[in-house]
Amino acid sequence: MDLNADFNTRAIVHSNQIEWVPSPMPGVDRRMLDRIGGEVARATSIVRYAAGSHFSEHTHTGGEEFIVLDGVFQDEHGDYPAGTYVRNPPTTAHTPRSDQGCTIFVKLWQFDMGDRNQFRLTMDDALGAPVDGVATAQLHRDARETVTYSALDSNATLTNTDAGGIEVLILEGGVQDSDEVLEKGAWLRLPEGAPLSLTATDGGAKLWMKTGHLPHAKPPVAGDNS
């Protein structure tokens, strides 16, 4: 499957407006944002776990990055409540589940294959002091990409001109992007050279952003059954 697989064009998905697609595991459904590959894929998705559902044990050959959007995600390493950011690099393994149900934003097969930096953090705890109405936390940075989390006050504007493409997920509230309002759940990807300018609507907004990563995008090369 190829979905939003042309990284030289602007892509946008209002994820709350698309249907859930069942995964191979009962009770686990997905809204696909971009994808290259079949069940083993370079993928960006919203994944919903029904209460009591689980995924079978697997190794993330190409790495896994996720944010818990609501509920509590769980595995044998602990509980991950809403607002938790997690990086499970290549070679890590787990058996994910959710006793009460949860929704996560997850990216697969998008790591440097030599990355072994595994961690979790609470995004709100990492926020710095606001500047011109925008507070930002750097969640991760390496030679390939920069990952941030930002909280915008009402009518505050966030801009970015980083090289290598820009990707954004709206976590709370809404933002104005040119002539379009992006509300909670909206996902935007801009190609190399396209600047970002988002202005928060009344009530403010929170968003996740990754930059610099698109030149490294490629299909998976080995088995990852997640």
Image: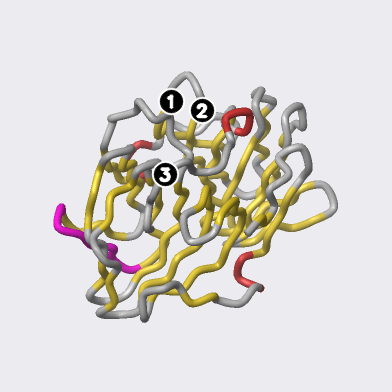
Does label 1 or label 3 sit earlier along the sequence?
Answer: 1
What amino acid type should be assigned to the residue bearing mark 1?
Arg
**Nearer the viewer's eye, disc 3 or disc 2?**
3
Q: Residue furthest front?
A: 222
**Disc 1: which residue:** 141
Name the mark on residue 145.
2
Name the mark on residue 19.
none
- Main secondary structure of the magenta stretch: strand
Q: In this view of the protein, which residue sits in the foreground, 162 or 42? A: 42
Region in magenta: 71-77
Q: Residue furthest top?
A: 143
Q: Residue at x 23, y 60 (%)?
A: 57
Identify the secondary structure beneath mark 2.
Answer: loop
Apparent side of residue 220 relative to residue 164 in the rendered image (left or right): left
**Disc 3: which residue:** 222
Q: Residue at x 36, y 80 (%)?
A: 26
x, y (%) of residue 95?
A: 22, 61
x, y (%) of residue 1?
A: 63, 59
